[in-house]
Image (cartoon, rainbow, N blue to C red):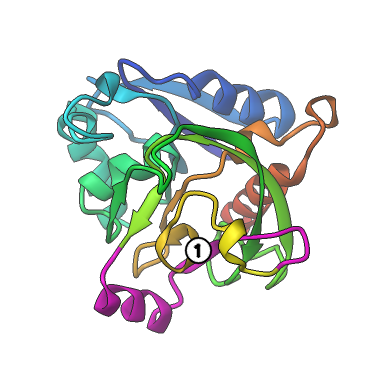
Amino acid sequence: MAKVGVIVFPGSNCDHDAYHALKYVMNVDVKFLWHKETDVSGLDIIIIPGGFSYGDYLRSGAIARFSPIMQELIEFVKKGGPVMGICNGFQILLEAGLIPGAMRHNEKLKFICKDVHIRVESTQSIYTSSLQKDQLLKIPISHGEGNYYIDNDGIKELQDNDQVLFRYVNAHGDATPEANINGSVDHIAGITNKQKNVLGMMPHPERAMEQLLGKEDGKQIFESILQALAIS
């Protein structure tokens, strides 16, 4: 059985959502990791959940990036360990330099909390290996600083290395201007590092796990992860 760690920073507010999704929906062994811990041994994957770490002071993720556990997480990544950053977790990964680019305020400078459609752009990662290319997923977003930015050279590198996993689209799968809900460059909703063991994504799959909540598409991402870990 996979063993999962969920990091908790002061200000995290989706840590229990991730814990519930993994323990009670996916039935895996999961534990909380306080941000001051320095031992991540025995874990198969680490989740950095959404929220407002350190109150988003300075900018989202800027202070959390210096928490004691982050050095251990960086070493975990260097050894090939998978790390998934969701929303604020994505922002923290960017601040730590584990994935390229930066995050800006949403294009219309408003906090957005709603269901969106994202399209699977690549299946060449543990996070999407059991999904289908161009598959649509309905997953909620909840952020004020989700406007992903990278320069033109950076976009080309992401494309050349097949690092874009998810893009914002409409219900028909089209990347229209209206579908790009926060103004992210190239409609990007989720990317990996070059080694493809680190994922940053703004939508919240842990909030789309049960029909009781009206949507289960997020479950497919976690199923993909667990299936890949089981055969690795």
Q: Is residue 137 above or below residue 13?
A: below
Q: Is residue 137 above or below residue 165?
A: above
**What residue occupies the far front of the structure in this picture?**
108
- Left/right of residue 58 with respect to residue 47 in the rendered view: left
Secondary structure at numbered mark 1: helix
Which residue shows up at 18% across the image and 29% down it? 63
Q: Is residue 17 magenta?
A: no
- Work out whether residue 22 or residue 161 is closer to the camera in this orientation and state it: 161
Q: Quadrant of residue 66?
A: top left
Provide residue 79's location: percent of width, then percent of height. 29, 56
Q: Quadrant of residue 88?
A: top left
- Work out whether residue 34 or residue 2 is closer to the camera in this orientation and state it: 34
Q: Is residue 153 magenta?
A: yes
Provide residue 7's location: percent of width, then percent of height. 38, 27
What is the magenta range? 150-173
**What residue occupies the far top of the structure in this picture?**
10
- Work out whether residue 149 or residue 191 is closer to the camera in this orientation and state it: 149
Give the labeled residue for mark 1. Answer: 187
Provide residue 54's location: percent of width, then percent of height. 25, 20
Could you tell me if residue 47 is visible in this image? yes
Which residue shows up at 28% across the image and 73% down it? 154
Which residue shows up at 53% across the image and 64% down it? 165
Question: The N terminus is located in which quarter?
Answer: top right
Residue type at tag 1: His
- Work out whether residue 5 or residue 139 is closer to the camera in this orientation and state it: 139
Question: The C terminus is located in which quarter?
Answer: bottom right
- Left/right of residue 1 with respect to residue 214 in the rendered view: left
Which residue shows up at 65% across the image and 32% down it? 207
Mark 1 burial class by Cα count in 10 Å: few <14, some 14-19, many 20+: many
Could you tell me if residue 42 is visible in this image? no
- Left/right of residue 32 with respect to residue 132 in the rendered view: left
